[in-house]
Image: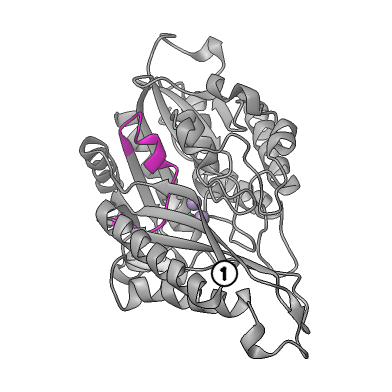
Amino acid sequence: MNPDINASRLLDRIETFAKIGGNSHGGITREGFSPADLQACARLSEEARLAGLDSTVDAAGNVLIRRPEGVRGAKDRRVLLLGSHLDTVANGGRLDGAYGVLAGLDVMQAIVESGAEPAYEPVLVAFANEEGALFPQPFWGSKVLAGALEMLPDDPCDHSGRSLRHPLALAGGDLTALRTAVWPAGSVAAYLELHVEQGPVLEREGHTIGVVDSITGRTQLTVEIRGSAGHAGTTPMEMRRDPVTVAARVVLAAEDLAREQRLCRVATVGWMEVQPNSPNTIAESVRLTIDLRDSVPSSLENAEEALRTSLASLGKQADVHVDIRVDARAAPVATDPTLRAAITASARELGLPHRTLPSGAGHDAQIVARIAPIGMIFVPSIGGVSHVPEEDTAAADLVAGARVLLRTVLRL
Ligand code: GLV
Ligand code: MN
Ligand code: MN
């Protein structure tokens, strides 16, 4: 029997997972290592077991799904890793990450059901905490798997200082045993990730499949500004050390880097917290995140340096302390030409309109690139939107993307 995707099974699963962490705004809040995220990981393991597949959790909290020993051919075969993530941003959509994982599960099932024997052993991974929404260590799971432990803090904490230790243990992981979750270079023949585009290009041009040629680089910082709290009615303007007015200037300085100085492609302040956040109190401190992206490493470095210079001068002018912490740096990467060709040939065989394009979003693939050649397949995002509840893709395109993934796995 020719292996094929089971379209209704895939679409039903996407619906089921959309309910896990569903919020009252119509979006999904399933931040990495939150209770909803743990529930989604548990549900994935359950679905895999029901499908006759083995499911384990590594020390980093990554869920790994394999064919049972009995069905496997040569045991020492190298692995073809398929994956994405189940965690979301706050109030995100149902497809970013979950689509690639659930399509990967259908691919695994299609292979087992058809008795097909791919050249490489397919293994599916749902990477832990790709977004870094709650614990600001994005690409957590892929960094551990790829052995990038030096890029991670020893005691990872969330924005409130709560250690990852306990939530990770609840997920089945172990902070003291991360080394056991590292895969040696050479063990992965290739990594394939299917994802929604999250931008407007494929839809605008009427393409069903995107063959990703590169993934943007990214630097994520948390800035803490500490001034002096005081009474809003009695503290004269010249006696204030107000971190909120400095934060406003920091936001504009970040925007300026991309919009006016063109030092990097985009710059975003998406999270901010004011302490004590009281209408008639001058704040004590403000914390905010800055996300810089560019496809050229030196541009990211220059943008960060310029930002540090302006923040130091803003702090000095207002007599407040400004601290900058680097949460993550991810280098821009190119995808593998052989995998691009395999994806392109699969799309062509299926008669699907396709084009090559870069990814402006970050993906676990760019971390896995440290240990394996990577390939990425995109499907169109309706209206080009993502990280919002409205994120969506036509059902036919979701199924088409999964078919391209399956065909690519079988052709490698
Ligand atoms: C990952 O979702 C990103 O922020 O690009
Ligand atoms: Mn995302
Ligand atoms: Mn994603």
The residue tagged 1 is: 390
Which stretch did the figure color magenta?
358-374
Task: Tell me the crowding category of disc 1: few under 14, some 14 to 19, or many 20 or more residues within 10 angstroms, Cα based.
Answer: some
- Residue at 62% x, 88% y is 238
Between residues 128 and 247, which one lies in front from this camera angle?
247
Taking the image as drawn, is residue 120 in sight?
A: yes
Q: What residue is at 70 percent from the left and 70 percent from the top?
A: 284
Q: Residue at x 57, y 16 (%)?
A: 68
Can residue 368 be found in the magenta stretch?
yes
Label 1 sits on a secondary structure element that is: loop
Q: Tell me: residue 101, above or below residue 357.
A: above
Q: How many marks?
A: 1
Q: Position of residue 386 (x, y in %)?
A: 50, 64
Q: Quadrant of residue 379?
A: bottom left
> Is residue 11 depicted above or below 38 in this figure?
below
**Along the line of sight, which residue is nearer the eye, 296 or 14?**
296
Place of residue 358 in the rendered image (x, y in percent of width and height, measured from the top left): 29, 56
